[in-house]
Image (spheres, rainbow, N blue to C red):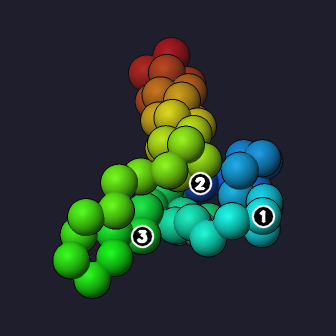
Amino acid sequence: MIYAGLPYSCPDLSDVGEMKGGSPLGAGTIAGSDGTRQPSVRELAQARFQGAHVAGIAAKLKG
């Protein structure tokens, strides 16, 4: 098993300009106690970045 978290090269990971989920362990969102908060633009960008990262690793392993 290979764990492919969210690398530090993700620009939205180090931005502290707003409250958001996500860490080097992976993309995430802060849903709030009642679950009504939707993922922010930055949280979605982290998820896309991690998806591309995982796809790149999978392509290299397949190769």
Task: In the rendered structure, find residue 6 and report the number of the disc placed on it.
Answer: 2
Q: Earlier in the sequence, mark 2 or mark 1?
A: 2
Residue 51, how many percent across, how many down?
47, 35
Which residue does the image show at 35% across and 54% down from the upper left? 38
Q: Earlier in the sequence, mark 1 or mark 3?
A: 1
**37, 28: nearer the viewer:** 37
**36, 26: nearer the viewer:** 36
Which residue does the image show at 44% across and 61% down from the upper left? 28
C-alpha separation, residue under disc 2 versus residue under disc 1: 19 Å
Q: Amino acid at mark 3?
A: Ile
Nearest to the eye among marks 2 and 1: give it: 1
Using the image, determine if residue 28 lies above or below residue 12: below
**34, 54: nearer the viewer:** 34
Nearest to the eye among marks 3 and 2: give it: 3
According to the picture, the residue beneath numbered tag 3 turns out to be 30
Using the image, determine if residue 5 lies above or below residue 21: above
Q: Secondary structure at mark 2?
A: loop
Q: Amino acid at mark 1?
A: Gly
Using the image, determine if residue 10 lies above or below residue 15: above
- In the rendered image, the quadrant that contains the N terminus is bottom left
Q: Earlier in the sequence, mark 3 or mark 2?
A: 2
